[in-house]
Amino acid sequence: MTAPSPLAVGSELLFREAALIDRQDWDAWLALYVPDCVFWVPTWTGDHTLARDPETELSHIYYATRSGLEDRVWRIRSGLSIASLPMPRTMHALTNVRLVEASDAVLDLEANFSVDVVSLRDRATHRLFGRYAHRLAMREGAWRIARKVVTVLNDDLPSVVDVYSV
């Protein structure tokens, strides 16, 4: 039996991440991320230009470590996130997953995504779509997410953008 290809391994992790978000299985979702991960959703600074530095330019979302994601999940669970009440339903679809670079320690992948968000507050469905760039790192014998950059292509948004909607 041959080992799965790096593309198959990386794709499986991306698909699992999407399913965990849609199920709102926050503990399992957080466990996919390394402690020093980056989660970034840059803004557009021009029609075809993205922000390049989350430290100096505006971002839709930016967490420099998993502790930021953990805090966000705590706010969602506690009810302190007004924007997440009631919690919307989501459906993530990933397509065209591509392996950009691979080594024994790192996998870089790109993919297209579409997320349907059912807002129970305003009884509407919104769709966000764009591109993912994931860096996976081998940590303690398992692949984990070290960096996720989400480029939202339709960023004239009718609703709140949150970790579960991208």
Image (spheres, grey):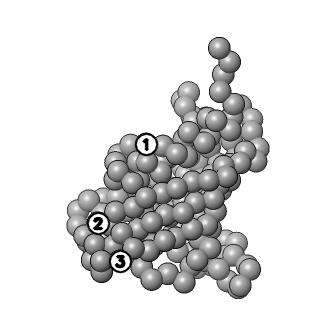
Q: Earlier in the sequence, mark 2 or mark 3?
A: 2
Q: List the residue tagged with mark 3.
A: 124
Image spot of residue 99 (x, y percent): 72, 45
Q: Position of residue 139 (x, y in %)?
A: 57, 34
Say what amino acid the circle numbered 2 marks: Met
Determine whether 8 is above or below 81 in the image. above
Q: Which residue in the structure is indicated by mark 1?
A: 31
User: Which corner quadrant holds the N terminus?
Assistant: top right
Residue that protrudes farthest toward the top in the picture: 1
Is residue 63 in view from this perspective? yes
- Judged left or right of residue 122, residue 144 is right
The residue at 57%/68% (across/down) is: 129
Element on which disc 1 rests: helix
Residue at 69% x, 30% y: name it.
5
Please tell me which residue lies in front, 63 or 96: 96
Q: Position of residue 28 (x, y in %)?
A: 38, 43
Going from N to C along the chain, the mark reached first, 1 or 2, is 1
Disc 1 vs disc 2: which is toward the camera?
2
Circle 2: is it few (<14), some (14-19), or many (20+) Cα within 10 Å?
A: some
Is 86 on the left or on the right of 51, as rendered? Answer: left
Q: Amino acid at mark 1?
A: Ala
**What is the C-alpha distance between the residues marked 3 and 1?**
31 Å
Given this view, does label 3 or label 1 mark the residue nearer the observer? 3
Q: Which residue is mark 2?
A: 87
